[in-house]
Image (cartoon, rainbow, N blue to C red):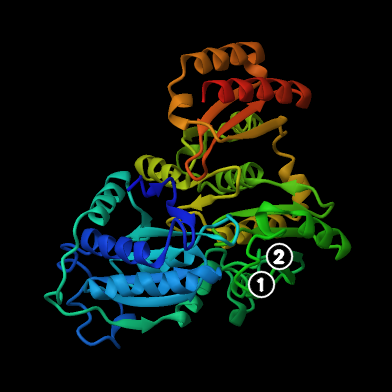
Amino acid sequence: MGQLFGTDGVRGVAGRDLGASLAMRVAAAGARVLGADVLADRQPSPDWAEIPGAGTRPLAVVGRDPRASGEFLEAAVVAGLAESGVDVLRLGVIPTPGVAYLTDASGADFGVVLSASHNPAPDNGIKFFARGGLKLPDEVEDRIEAEVAAPSASGIPAAGFGRVLDGADQAERYLEHLLASIGADPAAGRRPLAGLRVVVDCAHGAAYRLAPRLLGAAGADVIAIGTDPDGLNINAGCGSTSLGALRAAVTSERADAGIAFDGDADRCLAVDADGRVVDGDQILAILALGLKEAGLLAGDTVVATVMANLGFRRAMRENDIDVIETPVGDRYLIAAMLDGKFVLGGEQSGHIIMLDHGSTGDGMLTSLHLLAAVAGGGRPLKDLAAVMTHYPQVLLNVRDVNKAAVTGSAVLAAAVADASDELGESGRVLVRPSGTEPAVRVMVEAIDAATAERVAERLADVVRKVG
């Protein structure tokens, strides 16, 4: 068996790389690792009261996005957990950050999500959250992977089989939590987004019901698209990976802004009133400046990945905000944030983490705070996004190469060094293997697009030769 866990859980084509049998084994392995020795200090909430014997067994919440394969994979995961003696609160279709939040809010010992995020419908994945809604450290994933490969014990668990409870109504608690993060209370007339006209593209994904309700409850006039999932159309020509439909809708509807989520709504991108894209770097910059102005940016520091645009770094420096850099992946962002007690981090793709309000990247939370910055400051999104100047960035995915050979190549290292010397302080080079795809990513930033493209193509050629 090859390595199961990548940078964001177990991923693969459903029915080929990730079938029901493997999903059941991964769930059972997770139960053995994450459910061990968890009962002594756990205080489950009343959500579990309907389950006979609740509190004598480990507890887990399980959610998914609307992919067709999610139906049978969810059934397999729930079966693997219950057979292993874990009680399950089944959340149904819900954004990944909703599972993270409810893992903590319900007092569960861990959470499981069935989703492939921004990937196309044939893909799916399994992601775990530890108690508190935090992503698993590498060493814990390694232990689960070892358990998957080990012979499984059979028989009835000491505390009995786990029981399964329908928890679809738990989404209401998640929405209330999000609204409270910006002081919104529709019943009391507190609607911070009042006056904004917003288009929201839910990517036919996990946010298709909740996101329009959320923004509407916060006061926005909402036009919703990408809200008709059929199990096969998730992320297809819509959402944060394909912004054309959102840009067209924003201009045609004369909206103040557009918001796009990916399939599991853990990321958020935006579009201003003129149809210009506002990416994760710009969103992160807007939120960082707002928090600093309010005295809420811990350490006057923001955490970003190595992929953050050079323009973002310069904008932060000009505003006396330090930037901590991590590898790509929100798990690394979160680890650095927890280590330094920082409250804000994110990446260009739109994963924004606000640790004062959530334990992981949350697209719906991000959209609320971004739109609240627009409504509260009385300035259009275009003006807020102008805090940073984008340097042209070229990203090439070189496929069908040996990632290990590329990573260890002295020839490639020399080529990267030469390119960095050529660009100097007005550019940047990054070559890294993808953690979610069979590809090597070549990223080049430069003061002009032609230079960035020329250098990126040259490095991509070297990657192909050495790989």
Tell me: 341 left or right of 309.
left
Q: Horizontal placement of 16 versus 179: left or right? A: left
- Mark 2–mark 1 distance (CA, rounded to whole Å): 7 Å
Q: Amino acid at mark 2?
A: Val
**Residue at 63% across, 16% down:** 425
Q: Are marks 2 and 1 in contact (CB under 8 Å)?
A: yes
Q: Nearer the viewer, residue 104 or 414?
A: 414
Label 2, secondary structure: give it.
Answer: strand
Residue at 37% x, 64% y: name it.
23
Q: Earlier in the sequence, mark 2 or mark 1?
A: 2
The image's mark for residue 212 is 1
Q: Nearer the viewer, residue 452 or 266?
A: 452
Left or right: residue 2 compared with residue 226 = left
Tell me which corner region of the image, top left, top right, bottom left or bottom right, holds residue 312. Answer: top right
Q: Give the labeled residue for mark 2.
A: 200
Residue 76, quarter of the rendered image: bottom left
- Percent of width and height locating residue 290: 61, 48
Element on which disc 1 rests: helix
